[in-house]
Amino acid sequence: MHDKKIIRPEENCWRYVQADRASLLVDGKNYFRTLQTAISQAQSAVYILAWDIDSRLRLVRGETHTDLPAELGELINAVLKQKPELNIYILNWDWAMLYTLEREWLPLFRPSWKKQPRLHYQLDGECPFGSSQHQKVVVIDDKIAFCGGIDPGKHRWDSSEHAPDDQRRIDPDNELYPPFHDMQMMVDGEAAKSLAELARQRWQKATGQHLDPPSPNQDDIWPDDINVDFRQVNIAIARTQPEFKGNREITEVEILYLDAIAAAQKLIYIENQYFTSWKLAEVLAQRLKEQDGPEVVIICPRMTGGWLEQHTMDVLRARVSRKLCDADKYDRLRICYPHHEALGDIYISLHSKMMIVDDVFLRVGSANLSNRSMGLDSECDLAIEAENAEQSDAIKAFRHRLLSEHLDVSANELEEMLAEHDSLISLINAREQFPRTLRRLDCEIDESIDELTPTADYIDPERPVDSVEMSRKLVPIDEPKSPKKQIIIAALVLLAVIAMTALWKWTPLNDWLTAENLQQLIETLNDYPFTPLIVITGFAVAGLLAIPLTLLVVAVAISFGAWPGSLYAILGSMLSAILGYIVGEWLGRRSVSQMAGSKLNRLSKRLANHGVMAVITVRIIPVAPFVLINLVAGASHIKLRDFIWGTLLGMLPGILAITVFANSLLRVVQQPEPLEITIFVLVVLGIGSLMYGVKRWLNRISTDT
């Protein structure tokens, strides 16, 4: 035990309360089986706080030890029917449409759930723009509670074997998904009551409805088959809560991390999905520079999530890791990932958020080692600081349990191997080439990707983002040499654009400007040499003249077919966008800002995000005509490279969708056969669903900012 306590109530934790029992549940198989039993024993109230929930999740798989429904939604239906006094409250983050393809759409509209008046389901968006409700808490009757990193989501179940092609590891859509590693802590006593209080506070903020605690009873609902790791143990509850609507900022999660790192003497053992927090990296770097500082072992996934995360969060992780490696003068740092050779190119998705210090301090929760978990997202972690040898032994046993899983050895074998090596890092090095092991994480990234990726301020912010302040910081306002001249030029350009837009919309030109007329005009070009160059140049000029881009794309697609038409439309759009950008850059931000009005000034602030993602956003959402976006982008001094990439990535899906749609429609008109009609209907449904989801998310962002 340390001489100085790490846990300091009301400074680095909200509550420090006793649990009669506490257990650690590693991986979804163990947690969900226990959760099924716990929910089935509920009498009064169940609270579920989730970042994601899928009612189709099968809690148990390949097991026949119970008659309880395996599916979460059906289990909830069953217990509500059996227990007339029971109410179940589900608070799910009102998620961003970015996650649409990963989530169940509106589980409340399941027919069986709609008939349950005592099932209360609420989407919780009571958080700042860009943040999320990331707490993962379940409480049963104020008697037992679970807290950690596992949501009741569709890709969370797995066994600790993380076996290749495990047919039980299948989602509700009958698709196999990669191995998944995470954990929850289970507590009772005053710790469970405090987590229930937290859940009721969240419910009141989200709904305005006050919930009373359930009536106390003497029933013991702790599952009989759960091994108790700690008895009569004090539990710290640490939270992150961003400042929002009068609620003060809470950073207990961050302070507790900093205090634990500062107190470490021998070993800091971390498992975490992300590692991007610059502040925590600074403190770890200082400890690594000490001659007699602790070993630091950090286990992360080989890669995170999908393409977007790998090109953002993984890049930030590489930057932070380089900082630690530079500070590691005494070879006391290892950043590893779980390797399982039998998985081939697939890797274990390590999702846990766990820390052990010197086998006397343990924390498990929802908080990643990311900036946003320190101040932007809501988080909840539980921590134990050993007060006697028995509790310290339990923490050590848990660390060995995790290492046994990662190194694929028994607990006894691990004890023997640790005795043969003078440090944990030495053991990891010795087993690095085994089929299932911990391997050193290669934090090298392509220089071009590193250069393209913005700083953490934009990808992984620590505090809620103020768009106005960010705009002023990122987008310099150049002082024009001749203000009057700049204003006159800007006025003429913008008036010309507005005039052209009005002409196309409210004059006889509107009758002439049809897809049929444009198609006839374009088809005549087939008789001329250099047709592609003529079409692309004409497309670019037409875009500058404010001719509607969608109309141009349709005309080109019908005239030249889906694939040549798509290529011409993309190249023409890009050329038109670059020309508009150059004009806007020449005019300057002040000139455009003075003449553009409030809407385009808001657009300029959106583009001030200074990165590819900002441009993608305004390309997908119709916040302003195509040509005006180009002018404002140039005037906002966004890098041309970012503008080009953002324009390409943002417009490519839409252009492809329009050309496929136009050609499918043309085939139906020319050959109204069942097959062509079926293909057309499928194309329309697919494009419509995708664009509706993306635009709904982006429109909400546009409204908020």
Image: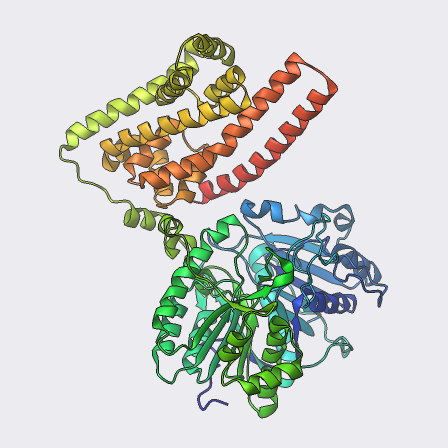
Q: Residue at x 54, y 48 (%)?
A: 96
| Res. 142 in view | yes
Number of marks in picture = 0
Please state the horizontal and vertical placement of residue 215, each as a whole percent of the image: 72, 72
Q: In the drawing, does residue 702 fall left or right of residue 327? A: right
Q: In the drawing, does residue 497 fall left or right of residue 525? A: left
Question: Please, is residue 690 above or below residue 219 in the view?
Answer: above
Q: Residue at x 61, y 65 (%)?
A: 199
**The residue positioned farthest toward the left in the image shown:** 481
Please state the horizontal and vertical placement of residue 522, each as a whole percent of the image: 45, 12
Q: In the drawing, does residue 463 fall left or right of residue 65? A: left
Question: Please, is residue 4 above or below residue 407 in the view?
Answer: below
Residue sitting nearer the eye, 506 or 684: 684
| Res. 21 in view | no
Residue sitting nearer the eye, 333 or 557: 333
Residue sitting nearer the eye, 359 or 626: 359
Please state the horizontal and vertical placement of residue 444, each as a whole percent of the image: 42, 59
Q: Residue 26 is drawn in which quadrant?
A: bottom right
Q: Residue 540 is drawn in which quadrant?
A: top left
Q: Residue at x 28, y 31 (%)?
A: 582
**The residue positioned farthest toward the front in the image shown:** 433
Residue sitting nearer the eye, 687 or 208: 687
Q: Locate the C terminus by quadrant.
A: top left
Please state the horizontal and vertical placement of residue 134, each as a whole percent of the image: 55, 60
Question: Please, is residue 374 above or below residue 173 in the view?
Answer: below
Q: In the drawing, does residue 73 fall left or right of residue 3? A: right
Identify the coloring.
rainbow
